[in-house]
Protein backbone atom coordinates (compact mmCIF):
# COMPACT_ATOMS: atom_id res chain seq x y z
CA UNK A 1 0.00 0.00 0.00
CA UNK A 2 1.31 3.44 -0.91
CA UNK A 3 1.82 6.09 1.76
CA UNK A 4 0.95 9.78 1.88
CA UNK A 5 2.70 11.75 4.61
CA UNK A 6 0.66 14.74 5.76
CA UNK A 7 2.25 17.60 7.68
CA UNK A 8 0.21 18.72 10.70
CA UNK A 9 0.92 21.87 12.70
CA UNK A 10 -0.90 24.50 14.74
CA UNK A 11 -3.72 26.26 12.83
CA UNK A 12 -3.44 23.67 10.05
CA UNK A 13 -6.16 24.50 7.48
CA UNK A 14 -8.00 21.20 7.64
CA UNK A 15 -10.54 21.91 4.87
CA UNK A 16 -7.92 22.63 2.22
CA UNK A 17 -6.77 19.03 1.89
CA UNK A 18 -9.93 17.22 2.97
CA UNK A 19 -11.01 16.22 -0.55
CA UNK A 20 -7.57 14.84 -1.36
CA UNK A 21 -7.15 12.87 1.88
CA UNK A 22 -10.56 11.22 1.58
CA UNK A 23 -9.86 10.04 -1.96
CA UNK A 24 -6.38 8.78 -1.07
CA UNK A 25 -7.35 6.99 2.14
CA UNK A 26 -10.56 5.36 0.93
CA UNK A 27 -9.67 4.75 -2.70
CA UNK A 28 -13.39 5.13 -3.41
CA UNK A 29 -12.71 7.18 -6.52
CA UNK A 30 -9.38 5.72 -7.61
CA UNK A 31 -9.77 2.07 -6.58
CA UNK A 32 -6.40 2.29 -4.80
CA UNK A 33 -6.55 3.05 -1.06
CA UNK A 34 -3.45 4.68 0.42
CA UNK A 35 -2.11 4.80 3.94
CA UNK A 36 -2.28 8.35 5.36
CA UNK A 37 0.35 9.15 8.00
CA UNK A 38 0.29 12.45 9.89
CA UNK A 39 3.64 14.10 10.62
CA UNK A 40 4.28 16.69 13.33
CA UNK A 41 7.38 18.52 14.49
CA UNK A 42 6.92 16.24 17.50
CA UNK A 43 4.22 13.78 18.46
CA UNK A 44 2.55 16.36 20.70
CA UNK A 45 -1.06 17.21 19.70
CA UNK A 46 -1.80 20.18 17.47
CA UNK A 47 -5.09 21.99 16.93
CA UNK A 48 -6.32 22.71 13.42
CA UNK A 49 -7.91 25.97 12.34
CA UNK A 50 -11.24 24.16 12.50
CA UNK A 51 -10.61 23.18 16.13
CA UNK A 52 -9.77 19.51 15.63
CA UNK A 53 -7.12 18.08 17.95
CA UNK A 54 -4.66 15.96 15.96
CA UNK A 55 -2.05 13.67 17.49
CA UNK A 56 0.66 13.14 14.84
CA UNK A 57 1.43 9.52 13.96
CA UNK A 58 5.13 10.28 13.63
CA UNK A 59 7.65 13.04 14.35
CA UNK A 60 9.31 14.75 11.42
CA UNK A 61 12.77 13.47 12.41
CA UNK A 62 11.55 9.90 11.89
CA UNK A 63 10.24 10.40 8.35
CA UNK A 64 12.19 8.63 5.61
CA UNK A 65 11.12 10.14 2.27
CA UNK A 66 11.95 6.97 0.35
CA UNK A 67 9.33 5.14 2.43
CA UNK A 68 6.61 7.47 1.20
CA UNK A 69 4.94 8.26 -2.09
CA UNK A 70 3.66 11.78 -1.44
CA UNK A 71 4.03 14.68 1.02
CA UNK A 72 0.96 16.89 1.55
CA UNK A 73 1.22 20.35 3.13
CA UNK A 74 -1.78 22.53 3.93
CA UNK A 75 -1.92 26.20 4.75
CA UNK A 76 -1.60 27.59 8.27
CA UNK A 77 -0.89 30.84 10.07
CA UNK A 78 2.48 29.19 10.83
CA UNK A 79 3.61 29.67 7.24
CA UNK A 80 2.54 33.32 7.16
CA UNK A 81 4.39 33.97 10.41
CA UNK A 82 7.62 32.77 8.76
CA UNK A 83 7.52 29.30 10.33
CA UNK A 84 7.31 25.82 8.86
CA UNK A 85 11.00 25.59 7.98
CA UNK A 86 11.23 21.97 9.15
CA UNK A 87 8.42 21.01 6.76
CA UNK A 88 9.95 22.98 3.88
CA UNK A 89 13.22 21.11 4.46
CA UNK A 90 11.32 17.83 4.49
CA UNK A 91 9.70 18.82 1.20
CA UNK A 92 13.16 19.42 -0.24
CA UNK A 93 14.23 15.92 0.78
CA UNK A 94 11.14 14.40 -0.86
CA UNK A 95 11.82 16.32 -4.06
CA UNK A 96 15.50 15.32 -4.03
CA UNK A 97 14.29 11.71 -4.00
CA UNK A 98 11.84 12.34 -6.85
CA UNK A 99 8.78 12.01 -4.60
CA UNK A 100 5.89 14.43 -5.22
CA UNK A 101 5.00 17.23 -2.83
CA UNK A 102 1.50 18.75 -2.84
CA UNK A 103 1.22 22.19 -1.21
CA UNK A 104 -1.76 24.49 -0.94
CA UNK A 105 -2.29 28.04 0.29
CA UNK A 106 0.29 29.14 2.90
CA UNK A 107 2.41 26.04 2.36
CA UNK A 108 3.29 27.41 -1.08
CA UNK A 109 4.87 30.40 0.68
CA UNK A 110 7.03 28.05 2.75
CA UNK A 111 8.18 26.23 -0.38
CA UNK A 112 8.85 29.58 -2.05
CA UNK A 113 11.01 30.80 0.86
CA UNK A 114 12.99 27.56 0.64
CA UNK A 115 13.67 28.11 -3.08
CA UNK A 116 11.67 25.04 -4.08
CA UNK A 117 9.44 26.94 -6.53
CA UNK A 118 12.13 28.99 -8.26
CA UNK A 119 12.53 26.56 -11.16
CA UNK A 120 9.11 24.89 -11.17
CA UNK A 121 5.74 25.97 -12.55
CA UNK A 122 3.46 26.79 -9.62
CA UNK A 123 0.54 28.82 -8.31
CA UNK A 124 -0.75 30.13 -4.98
CA UNK A 125 -3.25 32.63 -3.59
CA UNK A 126 -1.69 35.38 -5.73
CA UNK A 127 1.65 36.13 -7.34
CA UNK A 128 2.16 39.07 -4.97
CA UNK A 129 1.70 36.77 -1.98
CA UNK A 130 4.70 34.69 -3.02
CA UNK A 131 6.73 37.73 -4.07
CA UNK A 132 6.50 38.93 -0.47
CA UNK A 133 8.52 35.85 0.50
CA UNK A 134 11.50 37.16 -1.47
CA UNK A 135 11.56 34.14 -3.76
CA UNK A 136 13.01 34.18 -7.27
CA UNK A 137 10.34 32.12 -9.03
CA UNK A 138 8.00 34.83 -10.28
CA UNK A 139 8.60 33.90 -13.92
CA UNK A 140 7.25 30.41 -13.20
CA UNK A 141 4.06 31.61 -11.53
CA UNK A 142 0.91 30.46 -13.34
CA UNK A 143 -2.42 32.14 -12.61
CA UNK A 144 -4.48 28.94 -12.37
CA UNK A 145 -6.40 27.26 -9.56
CA UNK A 146 -3.95 24.34 -9.39
CA UNK A 147 -0.69 23.65 -11.18
CA UNK A 148 1.44 20.54 -11.64
CA UNK A 149 5.08 21.61 -11.88
CA UNK A 150 6.89 18.32 -12.25
CA UNK A 151 6.96 16.79 -8.77
CA UNK A 152 5.32 19.82 -7.13
CA UNK A 153 1.56 20.33 -7.08
CA UNK A 154 0.35 23.74 -5.89
CA UNK A 155 -2.98 25.50 -5.41
CA UNK A 156 -4.49 28.57 -3.83
CA UNK A 157 -6.75 28.53 -0.74
CA UNK A 158 -9.99 28.62 -2.74
CA UNK A 159 -9.20 25.52 -4.78
CA UNK A 160 -9.28 22.36 -2.63
CA UNK A 161 -11.14 20.36 -5.29
CA UNK A 162 -8.73 21.40 -8.05
CA UNK A 163 -5.85 20.64 -5.69
CA UNK A 164 -7.20 17.12 -5.17
CA UNK A 165 -7.73 16.67 -8.89
CA UNK A 166 -4.22 17.84 -9.80
CA UNK A 167 -2.62 15.64 -7.16
CA UNK A 168 -4.57 12.56 -8.26
CA UNK A 169 -3.59 13.37 -11.85
CA UNK A 170 0.11 13.71 -10.98
CA UNK A 171 -0.01 10.39 -9.12
CA UNK A 172 -1.63 8.72 -12.13
CA UNK A 173 -4.61 7.56 -10.07
CA UNK A 174 -7.31 8.52 -12.59
CA UNK A 175 -7.61 9.34 -16.28
CA UNK A 176 -8.72 12.73 -17.63
CA UNK A 177 -12.35 11.72 -18.17
CA UNK A 178 -12.67 10.46 -14.60
CA UNK A 179 -10.96 13.57 -13.22
CA UNK A 180 -13.33 15.82 -15.20
CA UNK A 181 -16.28 13.94 -13.73
CA UNK A 182 -14.80 14.23 -10.22
CA UNK A 183 -14.34 17.98 -10.45
CA UNK A 184 -17.74 18.40 -12.08
CA UNK A 185 -19.50 16.86 -9.08
CA UNK A 186 -18.34 19.79 -6.96
CA UNK A 187 -18.57 22.59 -9.54
CA UNK A 188 -21.77 22.43 -11.52
CA UNK A 189 -22.47 25.58 -13.46
CA UNK A 190 -26.23 25.49 -12.83
CA UNK A 191 -27.06 27.04 -9.44
CA UNK A 192 -30.51 25.42 -9.63
CA UNK A 193 -28.76 22.07 -9.15
CA UNK A 194 -28.14 23.10 -5.55
CA UNK A 195 -31.35 24.62 -4.20
CA UNK A 196 -31.19 26.21 -0.75
CA UNK A 197 -34.16 25.27 1.38
CA UNK A 198 -35.29 27.67 4.06
CA UNK A 199 -37.83 26.38 6.53
Image (tube, rainbow, N blue to C red):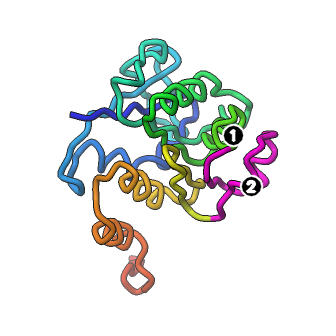
SS at mark 1? Answer: helix
Report the side of 178 relative to 106 (left or right): left
Give the distance between the C-alpha atoms of the residues marked 1 and 2, in whole angstroms: 13 Å
Q: Position of residue 170 (x, y in %)?
A: 40, 52
Residue 8's disc number: none
Q: Residue furthest left?
A: 31
- Secondary structure mostly taken by the magenta-highlighted segment of the chain: loop
Task: Residue at 54% x, 36% y: name it.
Answer: 12
Quadrant location of residue 155? bottom right
Task: Residue at 73% x, 30% y: name it.
Answer: 82
Residue tagged 2: 139
Residue tagged 1: 112
Task: Residue at 39% x, 81% y: name it.
Answer: 195
Label 2 crowd (10 A; few <14 / some 14-19 / many >=20): few
SS at mark 2? Answer: helix
Quadrant location of residue 157? bottom right
Q: Which residue is nearer to you in this view: 25 or 93?
A: 93
Label 1 crowd (10 A; few <14 / some 14-19 / many >=20): many
Task: Residue at 40% x, 48% y: name it.
Answer: 18
Q: Magenta residues, as a range?
A: 119-143
Report the side of 138 relative to 188 (left or right): right
Q: Which residue is nearer to you in this view: 53 or 117?
A: 117
Q: Position of residue 194 (x, y in %)?
A: 38, 79
Q: Is residue 92 magenta?
A: no
Q: Is residue 121 magenta?
A: yes
Look at the picture and state if 89 lies above or below 134. Answer: above
Q: Position of residue 156 (x, y in %)?
A: 60, 55
Q: Which residue is nearer to you in this view: 81 or 121?
A: 121
Q: Which image quarter holds the C terminus?
A: bottom left
Q: Which image quarter holds the N terminus?
A: top left
Q: Position of residue 60 (x, y in %)?
A: 48, 18
Amino acid sequence: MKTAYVGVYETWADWEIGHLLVELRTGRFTGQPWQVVTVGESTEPVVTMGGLRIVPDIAIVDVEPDEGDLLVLAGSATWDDGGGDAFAKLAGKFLDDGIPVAAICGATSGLARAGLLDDRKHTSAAKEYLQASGYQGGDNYVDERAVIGGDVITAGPDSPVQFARATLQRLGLADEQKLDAYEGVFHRSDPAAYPILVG
